Image (cartoon, grey):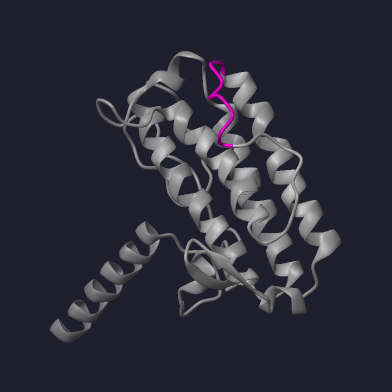
Amino acid sequence: MINTIDEFMEVWKRESDGTRKIMAALTDESLKQPVADDHRTLGRIAWHIIGSIPEMAERTGLKLDCPKESDPVPTTAEEIKKGYDPAATSLAAQVKKNWTDETLQVEDDMYGETWKRGTTLTILSIHEVHHRGQMTVLMRQAGLTVPGVFGLPKRNGSTTACNPRPYDWLCSRVPHRKREHQCVACRSSALALDERLMSSRQAA
């Protein structure tokens, strides 16, 4: 759970910047790409990400100046891009203005459950990552180039190595032997290398 305002501001900047990169790669035609027949389209998922920000925030008493999920889904990528920024920016501004670290321990009724506000901010951030991942799958199906968010993406049929950097907030929840960023692929490679080294030592 997010426990301080500073932690949320760091997490939210990183995640909202990543979402902006994904939104910026959308095209008008790609918005029609469906998950399946009679299911959400890429454009609808993008609008759901935007609309969920004020929907969840307003359950905690915050008032955001941005589009609502009940608003009609835009038909152009530019409208969706323009809709995300005020939602993400307004959330950060309202949290910073109205809440303190102690406020994050306050509980609200959220969908029939009781959540601390720190939990709500955590779930809102993870919710965005979840649907952003769905978007990248549909973007590939629509023939778009997907920008990298956690490291570099796969391009031209080859897998690019993970870009070493300070590990992101998701990876920081996973214990590592070394204090450095390691994506799942890198950790798998490291484990495989350890096994090979162990086998060679035993053979020697």
Report the number of discs. Answer: 0
Taking the spot 20% from the left edge, 77% from the top edge, the residue there is 200
Whether 105 is among the magenta residues is no
Which of 173 and 55 lies nearest the eye of the viewer? 55
Taking the spot 47% from the left edge, 26% from the top edge, the residue there is 43
Which of 10 and 146 lies nearest the eye of the viewer? 10
Considering every residue shown, the one lying at the far right of the view is 97
Q: Position of residue 160 (x, y in %)?
A: 41, 43
Q: Position of residue 70 (x, y in %)?
A: 56, 34
Q: Quadrant of the C terminus?
A: bottom left
Taking the spot 30% from the left edge, 71% from the top edge, the residue there is 191
| Displayed quadrant of residue 86 | top right
Q: Quadrant of the N terminus?
A: bottom right
Q: Is residue 60 above or below residue 159?
A: below
Considering every residue shown, the one lying at the far top of the view is 29
Q: Main secondary structure of the magenta part?
A: loop
Residue 129 as seen in the image, left or right of residue 195: right
Q: Position of residue 166 (x, y in %)?
A: 61, 63
Whether 70 is among the magenta residues is yes
Instruction: Please indicate, yes or no, whether residue 147 appears anywhere in the rendered image.
Output: no
| Displayed quadrant of residue 85 | top right
In this picture, which residue range is highlighted in magenta? Answer: 69-76
Instruction: Please indicate, yes or no, whether residue 107 appears anywhere in the rendered image.
Output: yes
Considering every residue shown, the one lying at the far left of the view is 203
